[in-house]
Image (cartoon, coloured by chain):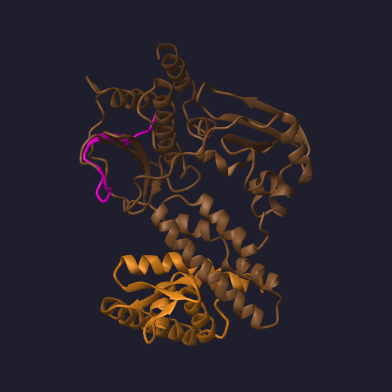
Amino acid sequence: VNGDPIEVCLRKLRRRWWGRRKRERMLAEVEDHLRSAAEVYQRAGMSREEAARVAVERLGPVEAAFRRRRRALAVVCVVVGAVGAVAAVRVSTEGHDQASHPTLVAVRLPPRQALLAQIVSRVDLGKGSSVVLGAPPRGFKGGTRSWATVTVPYGDQADELLGEWKAGLVAGTFRDLCRLRGLAPFRGFTEGDGSGAGVVGAPDHPRITAAPSAETIAADLRRVGLTPISIRLFHPGEGTAVQAVAEIDNAAPFLRAYPEPAAAVFGDLNPYAGTYLELVDHHGVAEISDYASAAGSGSEWRRPGLPLQPLLALYADVAKHR
Amino acid sequence: MYRGLSMRREALKGHLDMLLLAVLQSTPGHGYAVIQRLAAASGGAFDLPEGTIYPALYRLERRGFLESREVEFEGRRRRVYEITAAGRESLVTHVDEWRSFSLSIRRTLEAAG
């Protein structure tokens, strides 16, 4: 893991910031800021490493500052085209009014659209949510038909990411079940920031991999000074990511010591890609692996308020009838 | 000391838009340059976490008070902000309001003292 404080800060922001277009702009701006500041501190006599560390410290909680400004609205856009299916998670930062969209009623739909409707019917997207079939959202490139836009509003504070998780849940489940049903390959999904420019056609998801053993996870935890109490591995269903929940004694010292805790434990290139991993202590969930978002619906289920059981039943049903 | 700094930060937040427009009114600048100008102009009195100015810059841009463009600088992308005509108008209004408010406070304090 590269220990340069500026690189660590940028990696953290890159992985935790949703909304591709705004993220790229913000990351470029933050990088220019940090490197400019570090140069000033170096000229004042600091070592390179010290200058970088102070630059990051003085930047402050930039992610939180940006998020506080955001008007939250999460949207999943799914393309069902002739060459396969592409889904995009789209996060609007401008608060576009989607409330007038009608609720999805799925009848006599082609298989992929019907599957999507089944998924949506099992996910409680919450009040004010809607699904629209038809033209793509404004700014999205691609065909003009067979798009579904799922709009999930959410709050500004502690639950601000729940809408995005739900959006990811729909897209990830759609991907998994397309695979299970033998429907056209799902080419991946990505996030946008509401501008819609250039977000469709994202690279494929990483392959879901076998989870590391409990012994491997325990050893990795001990390596960074954590004491595992229990490690549970859970495989929700065929085609889904494995979930690993590691119970530890007290996460606080570890979280303070490492600016990027998950990477500190699990590394950047690691056997955990495709596995959703949570660290839990007596206060609750302390950290999740950043790789979870690339692991499909299995990675989303443990998030608070998400509907595990109805989707598990759907997975089982699809597996039975394929 | 801590309380003074904290109060100054809180007071600054309410006027950040005006201050950002002010330091950009004569010369365009990138984010870090804006922070340096703010620090220099205030004699180091304003000590906000530096990241907090970016949402403010974005907001001013969305409102049409600033424009930005990306340039290449030493191999990295740099975004430079420039005040617009609407931004100059807004700044004049803000400054007038501030002067009026500041004068009222001073008169009140002098009368009370």
Q: Residue at x 36, y 38 (%)?
A: A87
Between A296 and A126, the residue placed more toward the observer is: A296
In magenta segment, residue A136: yes
Horizontal side, residue B55 vs residue A14: left or right:
left
Q: Position of residue B1 (x, y in %)?
A: 67, 74
In-image side of A52 versus A296 (left or right)? right
Residue occupying image coordinates x 63% and y 70%: B3
Q: Quadrant of the N terminus of chain A?
A: bottom right
Residue stretch rendered in magenta on the structure: A124-142
With B3 as the anchor, is A152 left or right in this view?
left
Q: Main secondary structure of the magenta part?
A: loop
| Chain A palette colour | brown
Residue B74 location, x and y as percent? 50, 76
Residue A148 x, y percent position in the rendering: 28, 35
Chain letter for the part of the structure drawn in orange:
B
Q: Position of residue B96 (x, y in %)?
A: 33, 83
A117 within the magenta span:
no
Q: Residue at x 20, y 41 (%)?
A: A144
Q: Is residue A261 above or below residue A220?
A: below
Quarter of the image holding residue A137?
Answer: top left
Residue A303 is at least partly visible in this image: yes
Viewer-side residue, A286 vs A268: A268
Q: Residue furthest front?
A: A83
Q: Quadrant of residue A241?
A: top right
Quarter of the figure that contains the C terminus of chain A? top left
Count of numbered badges drawn on the protein = 0
Q: Is residue A69 visible?
A: no
